Image (cartoon, rainbow, N blue to C red):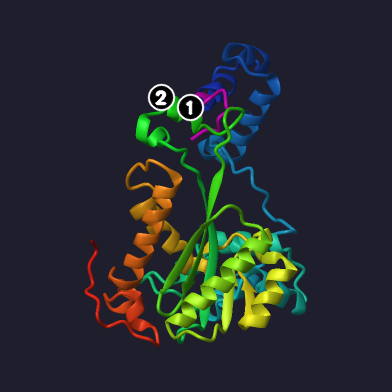
Amino acid sequence: MPHINAPLTPTGRLRMVLRHLHDGIPKAHVAAEFRVSRPTVTTWVARCLESGEAGLVDRSCAPHTSRTCTPAPVVELIESLRRERKWSARRIHRHLLDLGHELHLRTVGRWLARLGISRLRDLTPDGDDLRRPPRRIRAAWPGHMVHLDVKKVGRIPDGGGWRAHGRGSAAGKAAKRGPGAKVGYTYLHSAADGFSRLAYTEALADERATTTIGFFCRARAFFAAHGITRLHRVVTDNSANYKARDFTRCVEALAGRHQRIKPYTPRHNGKVERYNRLLADEVLYVRPYASEQARRDAIGVWVNHFNYHRPHTACGDQPPASRTPARANNVTPSYS
């Protein structure tokens, strides 16, 4: 097949050559007839005289030799190191440099892509995972890991906001954030034990360090009332209130170690994050409330229901209070 810029096909080139060789028409006249240049006619006539009709077919533009081409033994070594030892491209590149092969890291990566083994899953067609299995962080006993977090929600004006009256109503406009009336926010501070899933929540006015310290002290007393007297590790995110020195000193004085999770990885604090989602799905947005106090009362009722009645899969479909040292065994698991 001729290349994209070829004015003639091999059959057309043959007719052009025959017009000169058999009919005796000068090359300049043949070039004008076929609307090509005179050197083009000369080239195809010479190729036809040299190789016959086979010479009229397009030749490859690739060079016959390339000084920068990766030797075949090096390519075989790259493939063997990847398949047998599961080495990364960077490690293979370092190994080749130690052996004296002048090769760029990108070249190794391109060869892995050409060979179809650039990803670990490409090495296992049956679907086996070659990576190390993720090590799940599990709490070993009550108080081993206590997770803290703050959820920020908009306050509800007296009489209800837009959820109760609609967005276009006067009450809905009064609840609008922005240049209009500033209703403000409510900060839901929560603490959850990683082993028993026992949770404690308070609706507070802000999330400053002093407020967080007070909440932590009350949460510690709540856990102590359920037999969790020793908090080994307190896990938080990297919010300013948790990064404050006073909060860290309070945790180290009243509990054990303060551990802040890796930035932008909320799954490391997943116990309380999941609890916050349940709080939002089953209390905060399940129905409209007439006032902020009404919603706070509903939160208190739901937290009590969560700890003493709501079944939890991590607790064997039993309430979280059933896994605390001071076991509550006189409750009936129920979602309602």
In this view of the protein, which residue sits in the foreground, 11 or 244? 244
- Residue 173 is marked as 1
Height in image: 77 above or below 111?
below
Identified by mark 1, the residue type is Lys
**Which quadrant holds the C terminus?**
bottom left
Q: Position of residue 2 (x, y in %)?
A: 52, 33
Q: Where is residue 59 in the image (x, y as percent from the top left)?
A: 59, 41
Q: Which type of secondary structure does the marked residue at label 2 adopt?
A: loop
- Chief secondary structure of the magenta portion: loop
Residue at (40%, 88%) from the top-left corner? Answer: 325
Residue denoted by label 2: 169
Rendered image quadrant of residue 150: bottom right
Q: Residues within 10 Å of mark 1 (few under 14, many from 20)?
A: some
Residue at (55%, 82%) from the top-left corner? Answer: 231
Q: Where is residue 32 in the image (x, y as percent from the top left)?
A: 63, 11
Residue at (57%, 23%) from the top-left corner? Answer: 7
Q: Marks 1 and 2: in contact by CB < 8 Å?
A: yes
Gap in Å between the C-alphas at discs 2 and 1?
6 Å
Residue 83 visible in the displayed image: no
Identified by mark 2, the residue type is Ser
In the image, which residues are magenta?
1-12
